[in-house]
Image (cartoon, grey):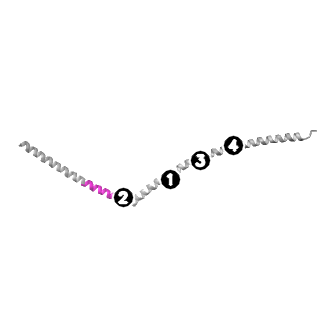
Amino acid sequence: MPKIESLKRDQESAQKEYSQLQEQISASQEELNTLKQEHEAQKREIESNPVVQSIEKLKASEAELLKRLEKIKEEEQQYTKEVALLSQKREEVRSALEAEKKEERTLHEKLDLIKKKILHLETPKK
């Protein structure tokens, strides 16, 4: 019997501890819910603040500007490549033109020599 009484007391004591813990858990959950509600209220208040809204707009504008800047940089790289290609082609054309001018001079010189020979042959010898 004393063992049963002892077990009953232990059970009652454990039940009391359990009930206290349950009460503490409930109180903590209520406190947590209250804190969550306060947090949400503060968050809404902060989000409705014009300064915060301006900051958010600035962040969005900054992101948009960064995208545009990246696009402009890509375009700049493309244009730089195109300019390099055009410069290369211009140099090739200039070189070809120089070669043609040189060939034309050579042909003119040969033509002049031929004209002199013809004139020399046509001129009566004395």
Please tell me whether residue 34 belongs to the stretch shown in magenta: yes
- Comparing 26 with 105, the one in front is 105
Measured from the top left, where is residue 20 in percent x and y?
Answer: 18, 50
Label 3 or label 4, whichever comes before in sequence order: 3
**Alpha-carbon span between mark 3 and mark 1:** 21 Å
Assign a secondary structure to mark 1. helix
Crowd band around label 2 with a 10 angstrom C-alpha radius: few (<14), some (14–19), many (20+): few
Residue 96 badge = 4
Residue type of the residue flagged with mark 4: Ala
Q: Which mark is residue 46?
A: 2
Q: CA distance from mark 2 to mark 1?
A: 30 Å
Q: Earlier in the sequence, mark 1 or mark 4?
A: 1
Q: Amino acid at mark 3?
A: Glu
Q: Which residue is denoted by mark 1 in the rendering?
A: 68
Label 2 residue SS: helix
Marks 3/1 in contact by CB < 8 Å: the verdict is no
- Circle 3/circle 2 CB separation < 8 Å: no
* Residue drawn at (51%, 51%) of the image: 71
Considering only order in the chain, which callout, 2 or 3, is on the residue closer to the N terminus?
Answer: 2
- The verdict on residue 89 being magenta is no
Q: In terms of sequence position, does the residue under pointer 4 or pointer 2 come before the other? A: 2
